Amino acid sequence: MFLKIDDFYHEIVSPFVREFEAERKSLKRAYGAVWALDSFASHIFYHFNNEQYLNDKDDIDFKKNYLRPKSPEFAFILEVSNATKHAVRNRSNVTIASSQEILASDLSGWSAWFGGVKAEDWGEQVYAHNENFRFRPLLPIVIKVEVFLQEICQRFNNLPPPR
């Protein structure tokens, strides 16, 4: 049996995200936060017993068919999670092809300016960088996805119980 959804959020997800907030230049903290959010999505699927509310057969379909279309940030975090878990992804339809595209560095000055990074996101941090886009700081996206998944839980909690 797995942790209840509230316990999973408070004991696993939130600590990983808060640690990444405190150490935004740590690859270790970034990976942990991204993996925790990916796992949280799976826990949401199994906690709310998908067949009561959704047509997805498993957590992979739930993420692909239900969550990804509702949040481009979640879609991106899922790509980062898969790239960092599997090191290299050889499929043609991926946004992040390898874990080498997730970097920890100082993102400031001309590189940040021409990379389109907002001024509040400058500084030492973890970001994604490849030929499809210049720089995407992970922390702001991680926080948006955390809120998005909490909202999904709230939406499911307010549904009437199954018959």
Image: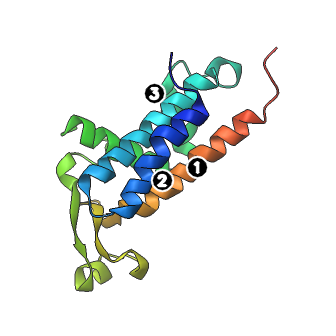
Instruction: From the image, tell me which residue sits under label 3.
Output: 60
**Callout 1 touching callout 2 (CB < 8 Å):** yes
User: Which image quadrant: the C terminus?
Assistant: top right
Q: Who is closer to the viewer here, 103 or 68?
A: 103
How crowded is the residue under tag 3: few (<14 C-alpha within 10 Å), some, or many (20+)?
few
Relative placement, left or right, of 26 versus 59 is left
How crowded is the residue under tag 1: few (<14 C-alpha within 10 Å), some, or many (20+)?
some
In this rendering, is residue 27 above or below 50?
Answer: below
Residue 157: x percent and y percent?
73, 34
Q: What residue type is labelled 3?
A: Ile
Disc 2, SS: helix
Relative placement, left or right, of 70 versus 64 is right
Q: Which residue is drawn at 72% across and 40% down?
A: 155
Q: Which of marks 1 and 2 is in front?
A: 1
Relative placement, left or right, of 90 versus 69 is left
How crowded is the residue under tag 2: few (<14 C-alpha within 10 Å), some, or many (20+)?
many
Residue 159: x percent and y percent?
78, 32
Q: Residue at x 70, y 41 (%)?
A: 154
Q: Nearer the viewer, mark 3 or mark 1?
A: 1
Instruction: From the image, tell me which residue sits under label 2.
Output: 73
Q: Which of marks 3 and 1 is nearer the N terminus?
A: 3
Q: Residue at x 49, y 25 (%)?
A: 59
Q: Who is closer to the viewer here, 58 or 6?
A: 6
For residue 130, which numbered disc appears in the image?
none
For residue 148, which numbered disc appears in the image?
1
Q: Which amino acid does label 2 sit on?
A: Glu
Q: What residue type is labelled 1?
A: Phe
